[in-house]
Amino acid sequence: MPELIKYLLLLVCLGFGIVSASSDYSEQLLLRPLHPSSLLASFNFQSNASWESFEQQNFRYFPRSLGQILQFANTRELHLRFSLGRWDAENWGARPWGGAREGGTGVELWAWVEADTDEEADGRWLTLTNALSGLFCASLNFIDSTRTTRPVMSFQPSNDHSNATLANLHLLHGTLPREVVCTENLTPFLKLLPCKGKAGISSLLDGHKLFDASWQSMSIDVRPICPEGPGDCQIQITQTIDMVLDIQRSKRPRDNPIPRPVPEHELRCDTTKPYHSGDTCYPLDIAQDENWSMTEIFGHAMKGSCPLTDEGATPVCINVPHARNVFTSGGAVEHKDESGFMRCFELAAEQDFEIVLPSQDLPERAPLEQPLLYAERSFTGYGQERGGVEAILTNPSTTEAVDFVYMESLPWFMKVYLHTLKAKINGVDGDVIQEMYYRPAQDRKRGTQLEVRMRIPQNSTVVLSYDFEKAILRYTEYPPDANRGFDIAAAVITIGNVSIRTTSLLLSLPTPDFSMPYNVIILTSTVMALAFGMVFNLLVRRFVGADEAEQWDIRAIRLRLLAQLKTILRRFKKEQKVAKTE
């Protein structure tokens, strides 16, 4: 815990954390090399607007499109997340921002809506999700009652809400783990920024690079802040993009992205290994010292600084040892902190900015912060009728215990057996569950909500498990790719101001053979066509004797021939008359 506090204080001192209310707009980019051969790029944009101007719709840096939606839906606090990939805590350390600006795979949304009753809050929540769906080109309108929960212990509103407002606030939380995040979501995100991706650090955001990352998260947080008391309140919007880029993959040219083997003379092998030889090479760990540049990573240099930021700001920071060489473009002023690892750059106005890190062997590396908790979740059991969920929670600290809240939002077709809920500490049944909130599911109306408050002692592992039954859906409720399975939202672990999301799960349900309805439809259509043809023939067709049919045919032929002869004779007579007159 002291390491986390030290890290957060460092971010605040660098202006990368909570920016003071005196600044209307600020932005900053933090670059941090990770193991192995990866780079964490954290983009942070923050705007403040006075509450009076917000109520009067006098928007300056606050996006008008989002502000009007919040006013119409009476939303006092909003948190929206778009995430893809998996954060590798063992190699990358603690999550950026303590996981507070991270969501589960897909789309996650929670908000505090002001309303007098639960029914009114549900109506405004529906208005909010539909409006945000159109604004961000996402499927947020599919967050219905079956995907909406009301957390009790997991989320807390901002401390700057007035007492009168807190009494009428309703917390609603929804997830779409199946949602695919793509460029259609990034474009509206950039349009909310004052510089709109044309200048400043936002000019580095390219959909080809962002969605090619190993892990990425886009977040939007809107909350009230009152730095000097209730009489001086503002509304603050914070937009964040975090992504982990593979350095070698990002350096490939876009017109030739196929990976190719490294030439033999460029291999860097660990010669200390006993099996090293001319035909055997163990790769040398050069993750922290690999050479790269901003142009190679993002595709182009940074297009100057955003002119709307304060003068003297340091919009770009990098977390590498001070002993490592870092070259920048002309006009940039470097500022180093006292930690020995963080350096920030003050950019020249209206000039492109470039960073180049050459390859350099250094014994010293920037330390990685240890996460407060390691979390894993998976399915257990077999068969199409029942199953189980197992969450493995590990406290890596050797001195302090961890108190947290574990929340699951499960779909209605997972029938949880609450009596099978067990918690084992280091393989032995233990009393680690302090409090629990359970709201059972109702078929096609709402999902299961499970919140458990737990305490894990130092250097211990807790295994939380429970069983469930799989429901059989109607054939119209299956998606087009029913055999792929159903996405289950990630579990949310809250440790004070720190949040951790587990990976989402893929549930396989009993799936009918959809070729059989097709065969039935084809067979039924064939039988109906044959029956209709027979009845139609009986009603329309005329039945006569064979001799009558032959006579009728001869007479008809004679009549037709006579009619044709008369037509020919008439034409011939007309031609003769014309010839005589001439």
Image: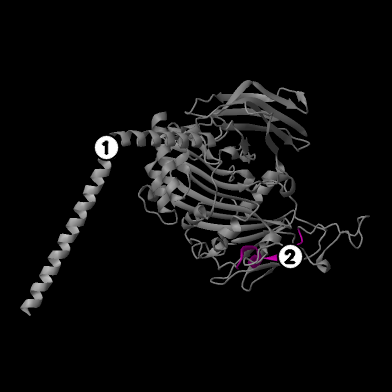
Give the vertical position of 63 relative to 90 (above or below): below
455 displayed left or right of 580: right
Pointer 1 residue:
542
Labels 2 & 1 near each other (Cβ < 8 A): no
Residue 291 is tagged as: 2
- Seen as rendered, the residue at the extreme left is 581
Residue 258 is tagged as: none
Q: Quadrant of residue 345?
A: bottom right
Region rendered in magenta: 288-300
- Seen as rendered, the residue at the extreme bottom is 582
364 displayed left or right of 126: right
508 displayed left or right of 528: right
> Is residue 289 covered in magenta?
yes
Element type at mark 2: loop
Q: CA distance from mark 2 to mark 1?
A: 91 Å
Among the two numbered marks 2 and 1 on one chain, the one whose residue lies closer to the N terminus:
2
Residue drawn at 63 percent across, 52 percent down: 11
In which quadrant of the rendered image does the N terminus lie? top right
